[in-house]
Image (tube, grey):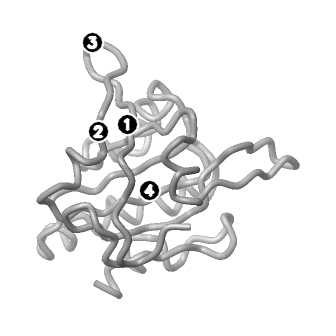
Amino acid sequence: MISTGDTLPEATLLQLSADGPEEVRLSDKTMGRKVVIFAVPGAFTGTCTNTHVPSFIQTKDQFDTKGVDEIICISVNDPFVMNAWGETTGATNAGLSMLSDAASEFTKAIGMDFDAPPVGLFARSKRYAMLVEDGKVITLNLEENPGSCEISKGEGLLAVI
């Protein structure tokens, strides 16, 4: 599992553009930059929609003052769902980047995948937030339980950076 001090692996994620799904290299987003990456178990799920995403919308200005170049939300959903979720929650208008890890490749590569069959979630991401500088994990806040959202919400990450 990825930890503080580790370098993120190369990964190709997806986002929806005017021309359809387009690939986004994570290294292009992180190299030479200070970014926040937060991940959720699923778009349109309760805690993710009602707590996690809104916490980063509400704290975006505070992250900006700390020199964060971009806030990225990653979920194991397709880019169409991530786009619709970004529009519905206001995340896109707030300037958050909604990226799809549709095949769970990045999530598995960093050891953050889990299954929750009773609620229909398979190969999903654990809930976490991290500060990344130049591709290196500076701070990682991982929730013990994917249903809780305390240390991984915007305020929780701001408290430790």
Q: Position of residue 51 (x, y in %)?
A: 52, 63
Which one is nearer the viewer's eye here, 81 or 49? 81
Q: Earlier in the sequence, mark 3 or mark 1?
A: 1
Specify the quadrant that holds the N terminus: bottom right
Q: Earlier in the sequence, mark 2 or mark 3?
A: 3
Q: For marks 4 and 1, give the CA distance.
A: 22 Å
Q: Position of residue 86 (x, y in %)?
A: 39, 39
In the current view of this chain or complex, which residue is farthest to the top? 19
- The numbered disc on residue 19 is 3
Q: For marks 3 and 1, give the CA distance.
A: 18 Å
| Element class at badge 4 | helix
Q: Are marks 1 and 2 in contact (CB under 8 Å)?
A: yes
Q: Residue at x 54, y 57 (%)?
A: 50
Q: Position of residue 112 (x, y in %)?
A: 59, 59
In the current view of this chain or complex, which residue is farthest to the bottom? 160
Q: Which dot, 2 or 3, sits closer to the camera? A: 2
Q: Position of residue 82 (x, y in %)?
A: 45, 35
Q: Earlier in the sequence, mark 4 or mark 1?
A: 1
| Element class at badge 2 | strand
- The numbered disc on residue 12 is 1
| Element class at badge 1 | strand
Q: Which dot, 4 or 1, sits closer to the camera? A: 1
> Which amino acid does the dot numbered 2 rest on?
Arg
Q: Are marks 4 and 3 in contact (CB under 8 Å)?
A: no
Q: Residue at x 88, y 49 (%)?
A: 118
> Which amino acid does the dot numbered 4 rest on?
Val
Residue under numbered circle 4: 53
Q: Going by the image, does 137 lie left or right of 111?
A: left
- The numbered disc on residue 25 is 2
Q: Are marks 2 and 3 in contact (CB under 8 Å)?
A: no
